[in-house]
């Protein structure tokens, strides 16, 4: 997990711990929940770049230590460009995006704090991912006269739908029927391993 993601999760955990220590904080002990739904936002890491990402989720926790969750995730849209002078001035631009659904089995680890949960999850994701690459010689905007560098076509676009393993871990804090969440999740698409660090909120239906 990249250092920035570790720092982001640490900040979220610190916020939750501080809230727990506030006098009179309303809490509800962790317990089985027939149904919950919510959303999460923050940043994803896709193609070695960060972008705004979000997720919508619905889940169930029929047992104190076991549940299941279905998510729709949008890992954002990232772009980058690299300039080179060898053997001639040129720009290599890359563009990537990924979105889709994931289903997880969720295990909740027991903690001495009644309204705080740590969870680990594993499952499958089905993500639509697109990666585009454009090579532009400068000042000639064509690839007919000069060959591109190795592994860089004049313009290429790869679109794939992947069903692959996905996993994650997180922490949840219960305040009455509101659940505050901090999660890390990792997926597999188009030769990449995009990840999502998010802070979200869910409503546990009574």
Image (cartoon, grey):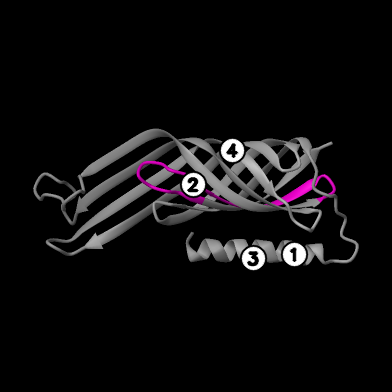
- Residue at the (58%, 63%) spot, across then down: 8
Q: Quadrant of the C terminus?
A: top right
Tag 3: Cα neighbours inside 10 Å, few (<14), some, or many (≥20)?
Answer: few
Is 137 rendered above or below residue 23? above
What residue appears at the point 75 percent right and 37 percent down from the top-left corner? 63
Q: Which residue is mark 1?
A: 17
Q: Position of residue 1 (x, y in %)?
A: 49, 59
- Which SS class for mark 2? strand
How far is mark 3 from mark 1, CA to CA? 10 Å
Name the element at disc 3: helix
Marks 1 and 4, the one that precedes in the sequence: 1
Q: Could you tell me which secondary element the residue under label 1 belongs to? A: helix
Would you say the residues marked 3 and 4 are in contact, meaning their CB atoms lie under 8 Å apart?
A: no
Instruction: Where is residue 198? Give x, y as percent.
Output: 60, 52
Q: Secondary structure at mark 4?
A: strand
Which mark is nearer the camera, 3 or 2?
3
Reading the image, the residue beneath label 3 is 11
Left or right? Give the position of 117 relative to 51: right
How crowded is the residue under tag 1: few (<14 C-alpha within 10 Å), some, or many (20+)?
few
Position of 8 compared to 59: left or right? Answer: left
Q: In the image, is residue 142 above or below residue 34?
A: below
Q: Which mark identifies residue 104?
A: 4
Q: Which residue is mark 2?
A: 76
Q: Which residues are magenta?
A: 175-195
Residue in the picture at 36% in, 47% down: 95
């Amino acid at each position: 997990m990249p250092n920035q993601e570790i720092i982001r999760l640490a900040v979220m955990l610190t916020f939750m711990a501080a809230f727990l220590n506030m006098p009179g904080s309303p809490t509800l002990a962790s317990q089985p929940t027939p149904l919950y739904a919510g959303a999460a936002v923050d940043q994803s890491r896709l193609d070695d770049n960060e972008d705004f990402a979000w997720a919508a989720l619905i889940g169930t926790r029929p047992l104190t230590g076991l549940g299941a969750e279905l998510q729709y995730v949008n890992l954002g849209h990232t772009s980058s460009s690299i300039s080179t002078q060898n053997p001639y001035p040129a720009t290599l631009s890359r563009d990537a995006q990924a979105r889709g659904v994931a289903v997880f089995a969720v295990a909740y680890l027991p903690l001495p704090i009644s309204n705080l949960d740590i969870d680990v999850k594993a499952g499958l994701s089905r993500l639509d991912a697109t990666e585009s690459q454009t090579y532009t010689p400068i000042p000639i905007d064509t690839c007919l006269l000069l060959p591109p560098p190795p592994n860089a076509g004049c313009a290429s676009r790869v679109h794939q739908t992947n069903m692959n393993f996905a996993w994650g871990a997180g922490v949840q804090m219960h305040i009455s029927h509101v659940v505050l969440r901090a999660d890390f999740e990792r997926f597999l698409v188009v030769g990449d391993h995009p990840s999502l660090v998010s802070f979200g909120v869910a409503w546990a239906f009574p």
